[in-house]
Structures are given as C-alpha cells and as structure tokens.
Amino acid sequence: MVVGTRVPLETLIAAFKPGQSPEAIHESYDTVPLADVYAVLAYYLHHRAEVEAYLSERERHDSKIRARIEAEYPTDGLRAKLLARMGT
C-alpha cells in the first residue's frame, strides 16, 4: 500500500506498464499524491527485478489463498441457490 492510502503498489505499477503517465495514474487514484506516484514509479524503474520478483511472489501467494477459499467454499450452483431463495 502507498502510505496513507488504500492503493497498493501493484495497482500503480499495473497502470504504468501499459503506458499511463504519472499524471493519468494520479487522476485515476487521486488519494495518492502525485509526488508519491512519481516516487513509486522511480523506485520501480530503479529496482525493476526486485519489484517484479515481489509481485510474482504476491501473485503466487494470492493464488494459493484463492484456491484454498474456492475449495472450502465452492460456488457450484450458487446463482441457482440465490435465485431460489429469492423465489424467482
């Protein structure tokens, strides 16, 4: 997370990779001060390998958690069950 906001580092980098400017990113996530957007992007550009490794590890971790939750709480037929409860 960018300090003082609920915007994760991953979100800003994901916006930057396809070519959004720091100003456009700031407009999309206006709770992040423009100076902080520049700081995050500068850090990313200077430490790309480390940040990419961190992002990959986060994705692996998130995938494991997602799989565990989906196994524990399957969504098979969930829509039908909800519609049945609503009486439709």
Image (spheres, rainbow, N blue to C red):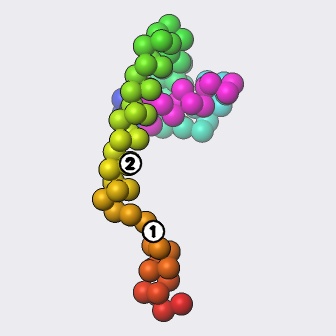
In which quadrant of the rendered view does residue 71 lie?
Answer: bottom left
Which mark, residue 66? 2
- Identify the residue shown where x is 38% and y is 48%: 66
Residue pictured at 32% horizontal, 50% vertical: 68
Q: Is residue 5 visible?
A: no
Q: Is residue 26 rendered to the left or right of residue 9? A: right
In the image, is residue 71 above or below residue 27? below
Q: Amino acid at mark 1?
A: Asp
Label 2 close to label 1 by CB (< 8 Å): no
Q: Quadrant of residue 54?
A: top left
Q: Residue at x 50, y 83 (%)?
A: 83
Kindly identify which numbered label has been placed on residue 25: none
Asked if residue 85 lies in the magenta stretch, the reply is no
Disc 2 marks a residue whose amino acid type is Arg
Q: Position of residue 16 (x, y in %)?
A: 61, 25
Of the residues under marks 2 and 1, which one precedes in the sequence? 2
Q: Residue at x 48, y 92 (%)?
A: 87
16 and 38: which is toward the camera? 16
* Circle 2 residues within 10 Å: few <14, some 14–19, many ≥20: few
The residue that label 1 is drawn on is 76
Q: Which residues are magenta?
A: 7-19
In terms of secondary structure, where does tag 2 sit? helix
Q: In the displayed structure, does residue 50 sit left or right of residue 19?
A: left
Count of numbered marks: 2
The secondary element bearing badge 1 is classed as: loop
The answer to which of 17 and 28 lies nearer the viewer is: 17
Residue 33 visible? The answer is yes
